[in-house]
Every structure is written in C-alpha cells, then in structure tokens.
Image (cartoon, helix red, strand yellow):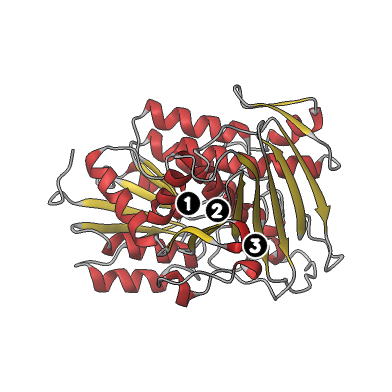
C-alpha cells in the first residue's frame, strides 16, 4: 500500500484529445503523481500534452512509439490507454502482464473473448483497473442507485436509454495512399488486419468494425448503458438482444450505421436504446449545467435515461445532469443535481493504485456494459437477427454467424 507521499508514475498510451485531457487531470488530481512517458505512433500528435506536462513537473515526459518500452520500465506504476478501441484489450493484457495498473477508455473491449481475458488477467496479476466510464464516480449516480434500490420507484417496469447525437457530415472514401511521414502504420493497426494506408481508416476509425463499435454506440452509448446498469444495480447480460437500424442520412461507404434501435430483454423488464447521429435539435448536457445545480431540458437531452417504475419515473442524465423523479401530473417526487465527475474519477484511480482497493469503475462492470453494446452490434451485423444470450456463461445462443464475428482477427505478433 502506498501513502500519498509515495510517488505514482504514469504513462500515456495514445495522445489524442481525450487522452491528453485524462493524463493532465490525473497529473493534477492528486499529490506526487508524475508522467514519465507519452506513447504515440503518430509523430504529429503528443507534442502539446508533453509541453503541458513539462510545465507541471520537473522534467519532460519521454516520447516513445512502442508501448512495450513503457511496459518494460519498472518505474512505471500505471498506464492510461486512450488508443482507438481495437487496441484497448491487447494493451490492457500486456500492461497487466507487466505488472502495471490500468486506466482504459471505453469501449473497454470489442468482443466477449477480449472481455473475459481482461478480467482474468487483471485478477491473476492483482491489477487495479479503472474503466473510463466516469459516471460511476458521480454522487448523482450513487444517489440514483440507492433511491431505486430502496424501492422508491417501485417495481421497475421499463428503461429507455438515449444517445441521439447531432448529425454527421457526408463521408467520401479516399483512395489508398502512402503512409504519412512520422506515422508507424503497422503499430497503429496493431492486432487488426494488415491493410494499405488509407486516411479514411486512419482519421475515421470510428466508422470501421475493425477498429470500433461505432462513434454513437461504442464511443457514447456505452456511457449511457453503463450508467443505466449502475442505477439498476448492475444486472447481468440480457437474455436476448435485437438491434435494427441502418444508414439514414448518407448512403456512403461507412460500415457502421448512423441509426440503431436496440431491445434488451433483462428478464423482468426491457431496456431499449436509441442510438443515432442525426437531428441537431438533440443536445448533450451543456457545460453550464454540467457544473451547476440545474437540470437539463429532458425532452431534447441527447443522452438521458428514463427509468419507469410502478410509483414514478426517473430522468437520469450523464455529464453531471443529475436526476429527477416525476409522479402524477409531473409532480417532482425527488431530485438530485449533478456535477461532471471526471476529476473525481481520476482521483479515485490514483487512490486505488495506492490503497489496492477496487475502483469505482472496475473491469468486470466495464466489460458487461461494453458487451451490451458489442452484442447489439452483432445482432445488427448478422442481418438484424435476435441474439439469445446465456448470461451466466456470457455466450451467444442460436446465432453461429454472431459467434464467428465475435472471434476478432488478431495478427501474428499481436495475438491475445
């Protein structure tokens, strides 16, 4: 167990916008934290976060391209994995094998196999893992969970989750080209299939099944589903899943749909998820509400959750949106404002590195929430077919095509 006086040494793996935000917050959320490495395969990225970190500590982090150098350094206590999603599982496995604790962004995995291995290796190596689902550190999330667990909503009847993001621009597939100077394309691809460089893959990786589960689903709806699961007491996987949808706005070459409607059979109640990328009338919780004692405008809040019980229904918001419970004639029965919990989430990770306690967003719950999204995508990809699920063994029933698709390709040298 480390005290606050014991230094925690971190390394960032993937220096994009979100990674830069997370590592700067981790550096500043607790005393005696240092960042020794910034690992990035693209020489065009990472310079600004290195400059910022240099101002906050007595030395500049070392830039490296190969994450294995970070794992080999015994000074490093923990790594922050903010790469494209297809790297999340393998980087986590390598880090845990090297004795590092891990902060890994969502979606934490892209298949059932990846999730199982992440949980197994973390337990075997006694590693602390914090998933990047920061709602789990929000006071409003704890309060919503406790309110529902106390029976104040009555029996849960149905749950409606939303991730209805504003629309995207038209997407035109560019031709293959030479690898840009300073980019290690082989390392960027990592476990994915070796293909020629294409800027439409590199810069729009969220639109390819090889690298992602989709910007709206994997990148954002994963947060909504995770918060809903937490509020409901972290139920197991559903008994069955059905996902419909398609490309609505632009009939382009993107593999991933911009509109998906999912039904999860949780046994005693259903959860539905609306995930989309159209309609600028839908907005995420704005900044002025994330850090205030105000509530969002629920009807056009893009990432709200509606939990219906026999005594009333709760509107629950991400990003510090808080929650309100309504009864007959829209009478407010209970409410709690929220505060965007990024900083608390990061502080919890540092605290758990020192105490060896379980984080607020442990890997087992991160994997369950991720697999809700992954299984929904498999339902869509197999022709919008219902997937049966053995929740106890976390396996797919009655859809062999989905089972095969769940076995992702891992190149030689990058196998799980």
Q: Earlier in the sequence, mark 3 or mark 1?
A: 1
Q: Which mark is residue 223?
A: 2
State the CA–CA distance, disc 3 to disc 1.
25 Å
Q: Nearer the viewer, residue 144 or 404?
A: 144
Q: Which residue is mark 3?
A: 202
Q: Answer yes or no: do the residues labelled 1 and 2 have beta carbons within 8 Å?
A: yes
Dividing the picture into quadrants, the one containing residue 341 is bottom left
Which residue lies at the image location 54% right of the left edge and 45% below the top edge?
153
User: Which of the two discs, 3 and 1, sits closer to the camera?
Assistant: 1
Query: x, y percentage for residue 201?
Result: 69, 60
Q: Compared with residue 10, is residue 15 higher up or lower down, i.e. above or below?
A: below
Q: Nearer the viewer, residue 88 or 348?
A: 348
State the CA–CA distance, disc 1 to disc 2.
6 Å
Q: Compared with residue 59, is residue 225 higher up or lower down, i.e. above or below?
A: above
Q: Earlier in the sequence, mark 2 or mark 3?
A: 3
Q: Is residue 189 visible?
A: no
Which residue lies at the image location 45% right of the left edge and 54% below the top edge?
135
Q: Which residue is mark 1?
A: 133
Dividing the picture into quadrants, the one containing residue 256 is bottom right
Q: Where does the N terminus fall, quadrant-wise?
A: top left
Dividing the picture into quadrants, the one containing residue 122 is top left
User: Which of the two discs, 2 and 3, sits closer to the camera?
Assistant: 2
Residue extending farthest to the front is 329
Q: Mark 1 packing: few (<14 Cα in 10 Å), some, or many (20+)? A: many
Query: x, y percentage for residue 300?
Result: 65, 70
């Amino acid at each position: 167990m480390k005290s606050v006086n014991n230094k925690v040494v971190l390394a960032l793996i993937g220096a994009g916008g979100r990674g830069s935000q997370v590592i700067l917050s981790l550096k500043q959320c607790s005393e005696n934290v240092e960042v020794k490495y910034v690992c990035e395969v693209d020489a065009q990225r990472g310079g600004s976060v290195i400059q910022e970190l240099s101002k906050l500590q007595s030395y500049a982090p070392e830039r490296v391209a190969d994450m294995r150098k970070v794992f080999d350094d015994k000074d490093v206590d923990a790594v922050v994995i903010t790469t494209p999603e297809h790297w999340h599982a393998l980087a986590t496995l390598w880090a845990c094998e090297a004795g590092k604790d891990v902060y890994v962004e969502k979606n934490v995995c892209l298949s059932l196999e990846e999730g199982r291995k992440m949980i197994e290796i973390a337990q075997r190596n006694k590693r602390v893992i914090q998933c990047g689902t920061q709602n789990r550190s929000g006071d409003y999330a704890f309060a919503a969970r406790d309110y529902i667990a106390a029976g104040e909503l009555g029996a849960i009847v149905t749950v409606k989750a939303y991730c209805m993001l504003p629309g995207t621009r038209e997407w035109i597939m560019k031709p293959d080209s030479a690898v840009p100077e300073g980019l290690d394309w082989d390392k960027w691809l990592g476990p994915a299939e070796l293909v020629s460089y294409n800027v439409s893959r590199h810069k729009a990786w969220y639109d390819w099944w090889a690298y992602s589960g989709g910007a709206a689903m994997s990148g954002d709806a994963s947060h909504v589903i995770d918060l809903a699961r937490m509020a409901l007491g972290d139920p197991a996987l559903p008994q069955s899943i059905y996902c419909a949808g398609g490309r609505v706005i632009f009939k382009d070459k993107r593999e991933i749909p911009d509109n998906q409607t999912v039904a999860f059979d949780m046994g005693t109640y259903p959860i539905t998820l609306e995930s989309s990328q159209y309609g600028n009338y839908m907005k995420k919780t704005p900044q002025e509400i994330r850090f205030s004692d105000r509530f969002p405008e629920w009807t056009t809040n893009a990432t709200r959750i509606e939990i219906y019980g026999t005594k009333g229904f709760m509107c629950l918001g991400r990003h510090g949106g808080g929650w309100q419970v309504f009864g007959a004639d829209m009478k407010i029965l209970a409410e709690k404002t929220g505060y965007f919990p990024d900083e608390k989430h990061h502080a919890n990770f540092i605290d758990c590195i020192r105490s060896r306690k379980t984080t607020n967003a442990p890997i087992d719950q991160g994997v369950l929430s991720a697999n809700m999204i992954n299984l929904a995508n498999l339902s869509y990809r197999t022709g919008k077919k219902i997937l049966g699920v053995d929740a106890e063994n976390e396996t797919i029933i009655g859809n062999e095509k989905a089972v095969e698709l769940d076995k992702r390709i891992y190149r030689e040298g990058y196998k799980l």
